[in-house]
Amino acid sequence: MFRRKLTALDYHNPAGFNCRDETEFRNFIVWLEDQKIRHYKIEDRGNLRNIHSDDWPKSFEKYMKDVNCPFKIQERQETVDWLLGLAVRLEYGDNADKYKDSTPDGAKNTDNTAKTAEPLINLDVNNPDFKAGVMALANLLQIQRHDDYLVMLKAIRILVQERLTQDAIAKASQSKEGLPVALEKHILGFDTGDAVLNEAAQILRLLHIEELRELQTKINEAIVAVQAIIADPKTDHRLGKVGR
């Protein structure tokens, strides 16, 4: 499932790489850091290079945190795919002049150009790379996992559209200013025996009332929207009746 990325990074055995083999996996991590990612200084890579140490898992877990990997050490396939993606991005950054003028083979004819315009047409939902990518995004955005990867992809799209667009971020960053409220004018209805707790309870009750008002507003808007769809009477005075 990692063959294409490994090939792009000139790994010596892209077809036979097995991340479940502990020794091969540790050697791969060392190669990736030494040759491609280079997050640590050379003198700081000693613990990671000591692949036979009993403390190597701890060193690798620290390394994952240092490079901001969103996965846990137990999620090996997702971790490898994420690290490969990071390495590919860094490799491109180091050789931007080499790749910027390159043209994909599929874009050299009109048929393939049309296909690349719609990248989801030929999407293989069973492809391990696709699944690993969707899982990585879901974990990064803290989206609930689902057995259907397309469902997760749709959830990711909705989240990005609603919360991560420039307009959504700008709207969320706008502070809401409310009117001051005199708590003493609002009767709590019970006494906790503590003035601070009473005040906190009053605030919570007011916030709850505000949420209920917002919910009622949304319900009213939904009712109006439905009525606009199903109730559109037209009056025909000649027939003496109302309706279509």
Image: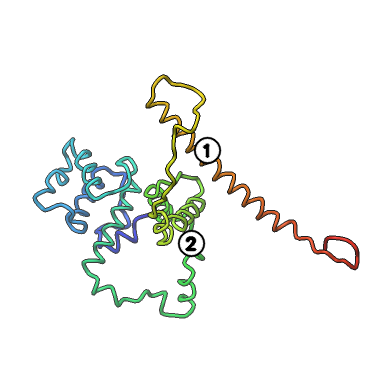
Q: Secondary structure at mark 1?
A: helix
Circle 1 Cα neighbour tier, 10 Å, few/some/many (<14 / 14–19 / ≥20): few
In this rendering, would 135 be left or right of 54?
A: right
Quadrant location of the C terminus in the rendered image: bottom right
Residue at 28% over, 57% down: 86
Q: Residue furthest top?
A: 193
**67, 29: nearer the viewer:** 67
Q: Quadrant of residue 92?
A: bottom left
In this rendering, would 195 be left or right of 9?
A: right
Report the amino acid beneath label 1.
Ile
| Residue 178 image position (x, y, % from top left) | 43, 47
Residue at 41% over, 30% down: 199
Report the amino acid beneath label 2.
Leu
In this rendering, would 45 be left or right of 103?
A: left
Q: Which residue is mark 2?
A: 123
Give the mark nearest the N terminus, 2 or 1: 2
73 is higher (above) or lower (below) than 233: above
Residue at 41% over, 76% down: 107
Count of numbered tags: 2
In this rendering, would 115 be left or right of 85?
A: right
Residue at 11% over, 46% down: 46
In this rendering, which labeled residue sits more in front, label 2 or label 1? 1
Q: Residue furthest bottom?
A: 109
Compute the Cα span from label 2 to label 1.
47 Å
Q: Quadrant of residue 96?
A: bottom left
| Residue 197 image position (x, y, % from top left) | 40, 26
Q: Secondary structure at mark 2?
A: loop
Circle 2 Cα neighbour tier, 10 Å, few/some/many (<14 / 14–19 / ≥20): few
Q: Which residue is mark 1?
A: 209
**41, 75: nearer the viewer:** 41
97 is higher (above) or lower (below) than 242: below
Quadrant location of the N terminus in the rendered image: bottom left
